[in-house]
Each structure stands twice: as structure tokens, then as C-alpha cells.
Amino acid sequence: MATTQPYPESELLLRLAAGEEGAMKALYESYFSRLYYFAFKMIGVEREAEDIAQEALMSFWQRRDQFTHSTLKEAGSYLFTIARNRCYNYTRDKNTRISKHAEIAAEQEISEDSLTLNIIREDIFNRIYQEIQQLAPAQVALLKMIFIENLDTAEIAERLQTTPNNVRNQKARALEKLKTALLRKKLLTQILLLFY
């Protein structure tokens, strides 16, 4: 609701342009509650609506010399435009913050899940490594050439001075022995669940 102006409209704007605090107080009393309700209807947050109303009036005060040849209606339009824009900014920023919080929470959840998964994988790899170390030394050496050095069958056959067919047979026996040990310790099921 507008209150009665202590100054005529044209005089109020001139006094505002001159930096007279009494004129600013009159403008504040006339517009603050209207700006507050306007902002509150747009954003629904009391404290922010108060801040927006004050910011609009402060913005007007900082640009008061631009309104010396304006009407009070034009000044009011300026105030409500500022308030509306601040409401849009608040809503945009709030949505961005909510989106960022959701993104951070999701990343944190993924990060925690990844960490847990990596710990489980590390444990399983250590247990598999321990089982591999229980194989015959020739089988351990063969599996290292296959899985660590990434050598193909022909390269392994050349290194061991044997045939590729013999390498395939030794590999099959070593993997079968490892599979049996993993089944006995119920590790094979964990491996399958972890990787598939």
C-alpha cells in the first residue's frame, strides 16, 4: 500500500537526486512493503524477499540522479524491475546450488562406491595372487608370462623352448588347478559377482 508522500512527486525525485535522506526515507516507506510482498510472492522466502526489497531501493539510491526528469511511476517501475530481476537471479542461483549439491552428493556416493569396490577388488586380487603362489613354480611362471607380461602363446613357447600346443596345455592345467583352489575357498563366486 502506498503511503501519502510528504513531498510532491516532482519535488521528491529532485530531493532524491540531491541525495536528501528524508526523501529516501519517504520513498522507502512508500515502496518497501510493496517490493517485499512482490518478491515474497515470487520466491516464497521472507528473509530473501526483505533483502531483495532493500537491494532494489539501494540500487535506486545509487542511480537516483538518473531520475530527475522522471515520474514517480517510472521510478516505481524501475524498483519493481530490479526486484523482479533479483528474484529471477535468486531462483536461478538456488536451482544451481541445489543442482550442485545433488551432483556433489551423487559424485560422493559414486566415489564411496568406487572406493569400496576397489577395496574389494584389491582383496580378491591378493587372495587370487596367494592361490597362484601355491601352484607349481613352472605354472606360476607361465601365468605371470600370460597375465602380467601379456605374452602370446607363440612368444611363451619361444621363451620356454617348447611348442605352442604344449603352452596351451600347461595353461589349461594351471588355470584348472587355480579354478579348483578358488572354488574350494569360494572365491570364484565372488570374482564372478564382482566382474559381471
Image (cartoon, rainbow, N blue to C red):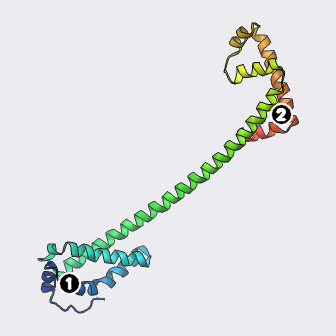
- The answer to whether residue 196 shows anywhere in this view is no
User: Mark 2 or mark 1, which has the lower sequence index?
Assistant: 1
Question: Which kind of residue does numbered mark 2 sit on?
Answer: Leu
| Amino acid at dot 1 | Glu
For the residue labelled by badge 2, is the local secondary structure a helix, a strand or a loop? helix
Q: Quadrant of the N terminus?
A: bottom left
Q: Quadrant of residue 126?
A: top right
Q: Residue at x 45, y 63 (%)?
A: 95
**Which residue shows up at 71% across the image and 39% down it?**
122
Residue nearest the observer in this picture, 54 or 98: 54
Q: Camera-side residue: 196 or 93?
A: 93
Q: Quadrant of residue 27?
A: bottom left
| 10 Å crowding of disc 1: few (<14), some (14-19), many (20+) | few
**Residue 157, percent from left and from top:** 73, 10
- In the image, residue 164 sits, relative to residue 18, either above or below, namely above
Q: Nearer the viewer, mark 2 or mark 1?
A: 1
Quick one: label 2, few (<14), some, or many (20+) residues within 10 Å?
some
The vertical placement of 186 against 168, above or below, is below
In the image, which disc is placed on residue 192?
Answer: none
Outermost residue to the right: 184
Q: On the rendered structure, is 185 left or right of 145?
A: right
Work out whether residue 166 or residue 143 is closer to the camera in this orientation and state it. Answer: 143
Labels 2 and 1 touching (C-beta < 8 A):
no
Query: Does the image show residue 112?
Result: yes
Regarding mark 1 in the picture, which secondary structure is present there? Answer: helix
Quadrant for residue 26, please give it.
bottom left
Q: Which residue is mark 2?
A: 182
- Mark 1, residue position: 21
Quadrant placement of the C terminus:
top right
Q: Is residue 148 left or right of residue 37?
A: right
